Amino acid sequence: MLIADDEPVSLERLRLSLAAFSDIEIVGSATNGEEAMSLAECTPADLLLLDIQMPGRTGLEIARELQGPNAPEVIFVTAFADFATEAFEVDAADYLLKPVKQDRLEEAIQRARRRRSPTGGAGTVSATQTVRPPVETGYEHEFWIRKRDGFLRVPVDQILRIEAARDYALLHTDTNSHILRITMAELERRLNPENLLRVHRSAFVRPDTVARIERNDSGVTRLHSHDGAMIEVGPSYAKRVASALGVPLESAKT
């Protein structure tokens, strides 16, 4: 793995976070875009963690130049949400906002690994397959995502989780994240809650991906999904989440 960030403090925080992964080796680090590009070209690495705004070259420029059949996976780590559209246009594995939470870093790395797997990850449905629309009428069963060269169809059946990113929504699947310009309120009207349940003003979760529920002493409830994501339940959504999951959340203590 190569890491690049022009802020020494951010670079060190990233090193400390990655130390939790016993099977990850950092083979190089850079503090500017030119150095990061040089390392990427001469150092074998299957994953790059790149800041976006760096002197010399941006992380986006590096990702574009490295695109190809043997290109490494790229996870962007940035303080700005504004570049998410461009990040997914270069097929980034994920887009993390600083300060990076450990569970989101783990989720991003696991997604990058699934993308490199020959099978694309267990249970992944190809975007070119025909997905049976839900029996219920009035709900979306697919979204068309704008790409630089056209549009990509993303079936709702593939979406594991949705999170808000300002005026956009990030649709997370097993192997990719897609950005869609839509409000969370509009998504709530268009999605079947049995398939994607709103659990917070800024999050939806597929109920059957929830592997564990915790509730801390401060009364905060979090859902842990099978792919390592951790999603907080908003207080006003607790009852509907409890009903959908069939769990009395008030008794789900850590």
Image (cartoon, rainbow, N blue to C red):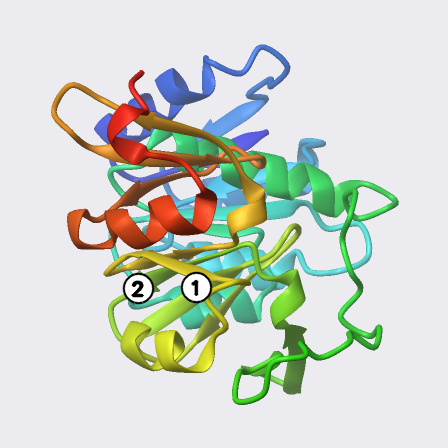
Pointer 2 residue: 165
Residue 56 horizontal side relative to residue 195, left or right: left
- The answer to whether the residues at label 2 and label 1 have Cβ atoms under 8 Å apart is yes
Residue shown at the point (33%, 34%) measured from the top left:
248
125 above or below 39?
A: below
Residue 74 horizontal side relative to residue 85, left or right: right
Q: Which residue lies furthest to the right in this view?
A: 118
In which quadrant is the N terminus drawn? top right
**Which element type, helix, strand or loop, lies under badge 2?**
strand
Residue shown at the point (30%, 64%) measured from the top left:
165
45 above or below 167?
A: above
Residue shown at the point (49%, 31%) measured from the top left:
106
Residue 51: percent from the left, percent from the top? 38, 46
Mark 2 or mark 1, earlier in chain: 2
Residue type at mark 1 is: Leu
Residue 142: percent from the left, percent from the top? 62, 80
159 above or below 48?
A: below
Crowd rating for badge 1 (residues with CA inside 10 Å; few <14, some 14–19, many 20+): many
Q: As rendered, which of 209 and 21 lies closer to the eye?
A: 209
Q: Marks 2 and 1, Cα distance to the nearest angstrom? A: 7 Å
* Residue 110, numbered label: none
* Residue 170, numbered label: 1
